[in-house]
Image (cartoon, rainbow, N blue to C red):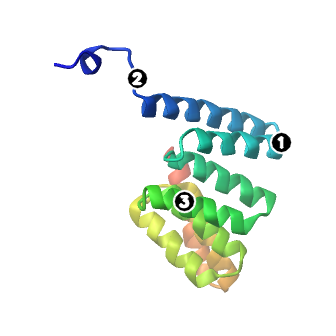
Amino acid sequence: MSGFAARPGLLTAQETDRSRAESIEQDSVVFAREGNLDKAIEAISKSIKTDPSYASAYIQLGNLLIIKGSLEDASIAFDEALKINPDLHSAKTGKGMVLSRKGDLQNAERVLKNALVLNPDPVRTHYELGIVYSKMGDTASALAEFKEGIKKFRQGRK
């Protein structure tokens, strides 16, 4: 048996990079909560450079770029996360948000529905789909999604 594999406490380079990337991501979250969007984007970009295979960092970057209004860059960030894991519902939700804000409502609806197939619980996805239906003039479907989101929220879902 190899000495490295059996020794507890030793991390591989990939595990070390992921741990650092996660720590830097938390810095980004703190900066965002403090309202310092530029520092939050700078930190999450550093997280991505530390571990380019860390999909969560791309999702965080995409969400920050939506807030900043950089929809094209946000779309790219969500696409990168989906390249790493095509089944990430949070990346699909982000992609749907971008499409909705760009006015591509049909594709936004499709992507958001797909996100709900992957995970039917996210309050945010139901909310965003409700917004899409509202923009489409489908009040009944919009209300149904908003109500479903509220129901999930009351159940403690995220």
Q: In the figure, is residue 109 to the left or right of 99?
A: left
Q: Residue furthest left?
A: 1
Q: Which mark is residue 11?
A: 2
Tell me if I can see residue 131 in this picture. Answer: no
Pick the front one: 137 or 44: 44
Q: Name which residue lies at 61% across and 59% down.
A: 77
Residue drawn at (38%, 18%), measured in percent from left and top? Answer: 10
Which label's residue is closer to the chain start, 1 or 3? 1
State the residue at coordinates (64%, 66%): 75
Q: CA distance from mark 3 to mark 2?
A: 26 Å
Nearest the camera: 135 or 9?
Answer: 9
Residue 35 marker: 1
In the depicted structure, whether residue 29 falls above or below residue 155:
above
- Residue 93 location (% of width, % of height): 56, 63
Characterize the local packing of mark 3: few (<14), some (14-19) or many (20 or more) Cα atoms within 10 angstroms: many
**Who comes first in sequence, dot 2 or dot 1?**
2
The image position of residue 132, as x and y in percent, is 64, 76
Q: Which mark is residue 80?
A: 3
Determine the secondary structure under disc 1: loop
**Residue 89 makes an appearance in the image:** yes
Whether residues under marks 3 and 2 lie with C-beta atoms below 8 angstroms apart, the answer is: no
Asked if 34 appears above or below 135 in the picture, the reply is above
